[in-house]
């Protein structure tokens, strides 16, 4: 038996509204909000980065896991906004958490699915018996060129998951995982470029929809699952429209995908996005429910997982701040402060 034993999220305190960004660039606020399905986004403070946010999310995961942290045998950090170009986030996080030195670690980079790539690897190591516990993190302080459509959604946040193999500790058992990958250049950033480029509509089809749909179908077919067998369908959330459309294409009723609407109030946290929604779902999930989560990373690929919630989740949900508690704790800033905090000069 392998699965999640602890989880945690972190969302920065500051927010900027879509209307404030559209005001600066002379765009129509209503059309932007309607087109993206996003009202506001989270903004990291000037002294926050992917390491500090990863530590906060991981500490919440440790509170719920209630394990000896020195037994963590792997730390994987997924991000496309690392603190250093050449130096891992993962080892800094490991030291700050005080887990010792007997662990393997790496930074995972696959656009917005670096976090789930790490989760997949950690689950595999635990399932094989090579390690007792693994920590996988998705975190980003997403960059966007000023005035680009990405600026309305690119946000900041982190989500962390601890995996293990003890039945009495597991809150969500892994039932299966699958992936779908291809060389689809819908989004990229060359070395030393400050901001990414993207293929606009190309990022939807054949990128996002092809990969999320095929990966989810592959998982469901391998486990012989139907939409009625799944209680929550979680997707990567680049905006508010894509995940809802993906759910509809797969035949899911709206109520099974509505947790993805978290993006409307925090934006796209990139490597943390699908994992952030998963954290939100775990905050509310009940024993016996099944959760399927499918990430997406440009370039392009998707990872899918099926988890079955256990009785252990009930006592662990309240041991750390919920995802929505971070959503509600906020202060709005104007574009000038946003530019200062994001070093846009």
Image (cartoon, grey):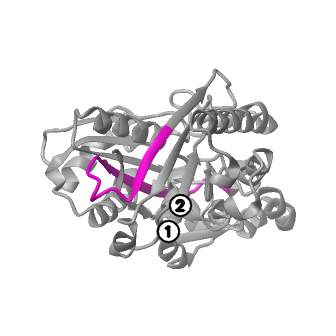
Farthest residue to the front: give it: 224
Per the rendered image, the range of residues in magenta is: 153-176
Report the residue marked by disc 1: 286
Residue 107 part of the magenta segment: no
Q: Verify whether residue 172 appears in magenta.
A: yes
**Which residue: 40% across, 60% down?**
48
Asked if the residues shown at circle 1 and circle 2 are in contact, with their CB atoms under 8 angstroms apart, the answer is yes
Q: Residue furthest top?
A: 183
Q: Residue beneath label 2, please?
A: 289
Helix, strand or loop under label 2:
loop
Q: Nearer the viewer, residue 78 or 310?
A: 310
Residue situated in front as seen by the camera: 145 or 274: 274
Q: Give the image quarter of residue 304.
A: top right
Image coordinates of residue 331 in percent, x first then y, are: 54, 78
User: Residue 235: x and y, percent?
Assistant: 63, 49
User: From this viewpoint, is residue 339 visible?
Assistant: yes
Q: Residue at x 28, y 46 (%)?
A: 165
Residue 118 spot, x, y in % from top left: 40, 39
Percent coordinates x, y for residue 309 in the rendering: 46, 59
| Residue 80 in view here | no
């Amino acid at each position: 038996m392998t699965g999640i034993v602890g989880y945690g999220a972190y969302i920065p305190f500051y927010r900027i509204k879509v209307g404030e960004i559209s005001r600066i660039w002379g765009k129509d606020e209503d059309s932007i909000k309607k087109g993206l399905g996003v009202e506001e986004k989270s903004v990291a403070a000037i002294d926050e980065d992917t390491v500090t946010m990863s530590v906060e999310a991981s500490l919440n995961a440790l509170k719920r896991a209630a394990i000896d942290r020195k037994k963590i045998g792997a730390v994987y950090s997924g991000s496309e906004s690392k603190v250093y170009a050449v130096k891992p986030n993962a080892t800094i996080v490991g030291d700050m958490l005080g887990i010792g030195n007997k662990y393997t670690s790496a930074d995972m980079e696959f656009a917005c699915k670096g976090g789930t790539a790490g989760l997949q690897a950690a689950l595999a190591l635990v399932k094989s018996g090579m390690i007792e516990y693994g920590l996988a993190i998705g975190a980003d302080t997403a960059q966007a060129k000023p005035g680009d459509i990405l600026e309305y959604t690119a946000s900041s946040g982190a989500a962390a998951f601890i995996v293990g193999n003890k039945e009495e500790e597991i809150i969500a058992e892994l039932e299966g995982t699958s992936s779908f990958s291809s060389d689809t250049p819908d989004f990229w950033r060359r070395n030393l470029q400050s901001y990414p480029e993207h293929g606009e509509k190309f990022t939807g089809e054949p990128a996002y929809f092809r990969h999320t749909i095929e990966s989810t179908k592959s998982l469901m077919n391998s486990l012989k699952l139907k939409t009625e067998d799944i209680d929550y369908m979680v997707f990567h959330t680049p905006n508010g429209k894509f995940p809802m459309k993906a759910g509809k294409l797969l035949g899911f009723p709206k109520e099974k995908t509505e947790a993805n609407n978290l993006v409307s109030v925090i934006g796209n946290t990139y490597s943390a996005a699908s994992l952030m929604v998963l954290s939100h779902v775990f905050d509310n999930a009940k024993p016996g429910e099944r959760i399927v989560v499918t990430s997406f990373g440009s370039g392009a690929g998707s990872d899918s997982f099926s988890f079955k919630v256990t009785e252990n989740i009930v006592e662990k949900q309240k041991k750390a701040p919920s995802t929505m508690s971070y959503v509600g704790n906020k202060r709005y800033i104007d574009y000038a402060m946003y530019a200062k905090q994001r070093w846009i000069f």
